[in-house]
Image: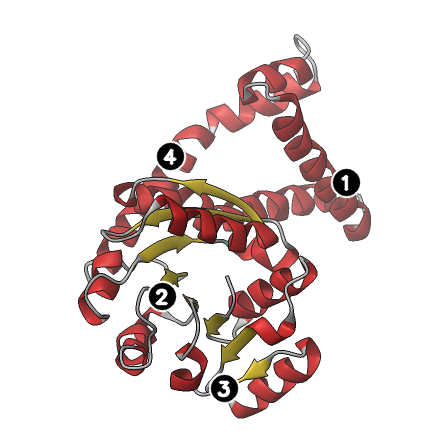
Amino acid sequence: MTRIAVLGGGRIGEALLGGLLAAGRDAGDLVFTEKAPERAQELSARLGVAAEPVADAVRGADTVVVAVKPQDVVALLGQVTGPLEDGALVISLCAGLPTSLFEGALPAGTPVVRVMPNTPMLLGAAMCAISPGAHATDEHLARTESLLGTVGSVLRIDEAKQDAATAVSGSGPAYFFLVAEAMIEAGVGLGLTRAAATELTVQTALGAARMLRETGEHPAVLRENVTSPAGTTAAGLRELERHGLRSAFADAVTAAHDRSVELGRG
């Protein structure tokens, strides 16, 4: 990659630029666009990356990352088509939009890779599911993995599974935040200070996530290891099961999937 244009200077665009710079990418190889002048100036000054109009940013770039709101994509692609370099890779970070939408608006044969990121990208801890369009090759996928690897983990999936990835990892942080919120409130209700309840909950979540990642054990095995017969954990789990926690999560993920499908249809 020699020149990367990030179209969109919002939180996701900023996170990607920051990750690339932290990984050693020269700021001179990067450019971004942002329609709000004050935001463009502030971000450019802070990161040392040039902000340019869309046509100028795209011209000469061999990788173009689209990181705008889905409703702004069609208008943006109208500005991209003319100056887009022949063979340039277009990476979409726009949730719910199929590669066919981009391929239909861009020059014939343009390689497109669809990505479902999530908000932990802001901390370099993203989970990004990537899928190739009709003209994207393994080299294009490898290039995308290299780029997104600066802000988290990357997983290749079939595009037909993108709505499922959206439901699990795209929306997933909100599920965990809700669980954390509930645990903190419960702790406060039992007499803990909010600060103490928050620290206990957050560190517990971090530790549990590390155990899942680093041990490679199935979640059920790890859960059983914490659960002594007739102990405190067993009592708590019994209540969660009584209130239908598993089915609630299954229904939530299914609802998020179905909504992703609806949004993709326009």
Viewer-proximal residue, 166 or 157? Answer: 157
Viewer-proximal residue, 172 or 144? Answer: 144
Q: Which mark is residue 200?
A: 1
Mark 1 or 2: the one toward you: 2
Which picture quadrant has residue 20?
A: bottom right
Marks 4/1 in contact by CB < 8 Å: the verdict is no
Q: CA distance from mark 4 to mark 3?
A: 44 Å
- Residue 195 placement (x, y as % from top left): 80, 52
Q: Which mark is residue 88?
A: 2
* Disc 1 element: helix
* Callout 3 crowding tier (Cα within 10 Å): few <14, some 14–19, many ≥20: some
Q: Which residue is mark 4?
A: 250
* Disc 4 element: helix
* Callout 2 crowding tier (Cα within 10 Å): few <14, some 14–19, many ≥20: many
Q: Which residue is mark 3?
A: 52
Mark 1 or 3: the one toward you: 3
Choose the circle earlier in sequence order: 2 or 4. Answer: 2
Q: CA distance from mark 2 to mark 4?
A: 40 Å
The residue located at (64%, 73%) in the rendering is 27
- Which amino acid, mark 2? Ala
When the figure is inspected, residue 162 is found, relative to residue 82, above or below; the finding is above
- Residue 212 placement (x, y as % from top left): 61, 27
* Callout 4 crowding tier (Cα within 10 Å): few <14, some 14–19, many ≥20: few
- Residue 123 placement (x, y as % from top left): 65, 56
- Which amino acid, mark 3? Glu
Choose the circle earlier in sequence order: 3 or 2. Answer: 3
Quadrant the C terminus occupies: bottom left
